[in-house]
Image: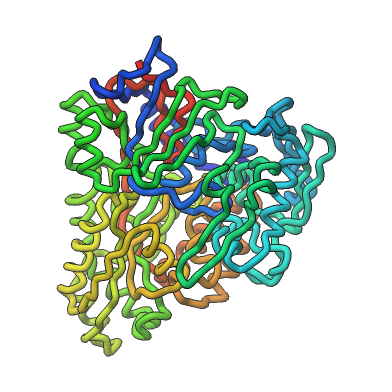
Amino acid sequence: MQQLRLTRTRRVALIGLAGALAVSLSACAESKRDEGAGGGSGGTMIFGAAGNPKLFDPAFNDEGETFRITRQIFDTLIQNKPGTADLEPSLADKWESSNEGKTWTFTLKSGVKFSDGTPMDATAVCFNFDRWYNMAGAAAQSQMIYYGDVFEGFAKNEGDAGGQPVYKSCEAKDPTTAVLNLNKAKGAFPAAFTLPSFAIQSPAAIKQYNGNTVTQSGDSFTYSEYANKHPVGTGPFKFESWDQAKGEITLVKNDTSPTPAKLDKLIFKVIPDENARKQALKAGDINGYDYPNPADYGLLRNDGEQVLIRPSFNVLYLGINQSGNPKLKDPNVRKALAYGINREQFVKSKLAEGSEVATEFVPKVISGYTDDVTKYPYDPEKAKQLLKAAGAENLTLKFYYPTEVSRPYMPNPADTFTAISEDLKKIGVTIEPHAEPWNGGYKDDVQKFGKQDLHLLGWTGDYNDAGNFVGTFFGREKKEFGFNNPELFSALAAADASPAGDAHAKAYQEVNKQIMDFLPAVPIAYPTPAIVVGPKVKGLVASPLTDERFNTVTVN
């Protein structure tokens, strides 16, 4: 990976773990799962999803349940090698940078078509880059979280993120050569090109179904007919239907894909409750699901199911909104919260085997991690002293947590909330709980409107770069955290633009020290999430980035 390299030992460890995960899986319990299967290919797989998708246009998405689906419909220019965070070709056979990292040339696969029959060529690639850059309207731009983080602004908002946006132009030199011109180098490239939000979509379908239309009414957003009913890509599957009453999203094989699926049909069945997903797998109603309860691993294995534990590529954190309760602007109050949480006990009692206490916001496997940061071990007496010194002994905080969802970094949000809130109560903090559905309330209230004082969130890495974690969290002013720290913003921008290799890693190590002194949030854990399938599904490769592709899956 050009922009950020793991140290040799960490890189080998991650690849080794990924190789161990690349075992053949089999998901089909005895009843419905065998219907239609034939000769190790064809048939239908039903996967138990933890939550409803937001929509099917990945440009406007930033959450995992939607990306799980869009990764099957769309391809990016570059993708992650299955089971790893390494890069490999996808729609681009090769890529190279020049002009000190400000020009990227992609040599595209020849003859690829979108599932609507239109050509996937350099003109289509440039259409997508121009679409993102020229997206009009505050509502639409506010939903393009990844584009805003990586490209730092839109055509009509060139003051965003402290200055000139990254994107300049895209040229279709010939049908198989797309040249991306940047205003400035970006350390996250080329790995950031693997982001599912940057998937290449059919220009014809976007135009036909008004794909750029996003409207906002109060706290709610409404998306186009394209985003809800007609997404068109080059992926191994194509969209067939979304039955919201049943909570089922049906994809069918895309025969024109450069990586066609072996399955005829792939159904995502929304089952928010983790125990209900487990029972559905046992009954044969689904073939697999994600984020099993760590306490169930042994039982699942005893029943013949396959539990694949991913290497940790994520972080769980307690978010702190400094624009909420004014006491939270005091760094000693934030430090008191950190000292008041028994993270060691939480990890041991609530998370899966192999999970660790987080000491910063970057997982250990990523270059840029450093052990040389300020740490906050469990010390309730010190926490009480800090609150007293800050005049915050009678602190009352609105603590938001999500419902109807399981996340890789948070398999059971209610249990996580209970454990942390009970710890905080012991140091004298009064907690006002606010439980909200993940989609349709929680994420918008926390990230767009900043209604909370404290909240639970986390991050699974999208690509192998420290900036994908700390830059995404703390690279600019955000409602989620409610602080303005120009010094930190500048340090993160400089690290992001630093050359690949040791300089890039060292820059982020220094930033991580600064972050853990400022403490805009409290890192809780590096969880190791698992994915489980039954004994008759073959070919699924578990990914540390939860980037599982179903085109290699068969149902025997």
The extreme top residue here reads 39
Residue 264 at x, y percent in the picture: 46, 22
How did the renderer colour the structure?
Answer: rainbow
Residue at horizontal 47 percent and vertical 62 percent from the top:
512
Residue 548 at x, y percent in the picture: 44, 34
Observer able to see residue 403: yes
Specify whether 279 is left or right of 335.
left
Question: Is 462 situated above or below 420?
Answer: above
Question: Is 455 situated above or below 41?
Answer: below
Total residue callouts: 0
Q: Quadrant of the N terminus?
A: top right
Residue at horizontal 21 percent and vertical 86 percent from the top:
394
Residue at horizontal 52 percent and vertical 36 percent from the top:
239
Observer able to see residue 501: no
Specify whether 437 is left or right of 207.
left
Residue at horizontal 67 percent and vertical 63 percent from the top:
136
Q: Quadrant of the C terminus?
A: top left
Residue 198 at x, y percent in the picture: 61, 46
Residue 210 or residue 40, whichever sits in front: 210
Specify whether 150 is left or right of 384.
right
The extreme right residue here reads 173
Question: Is 98 situated above or below 93?
Answer: below
Residue 553 or residue 541, whichever sits in front: 553
Residue 233 at x, y percent in the picture: 60, 37
Residue 228 or residue 381, whichever sits in front: 228
Residue 251 or residue 388, whichever sits in front: 251
Question: Is 330 situated above or below 10?
Answer: below
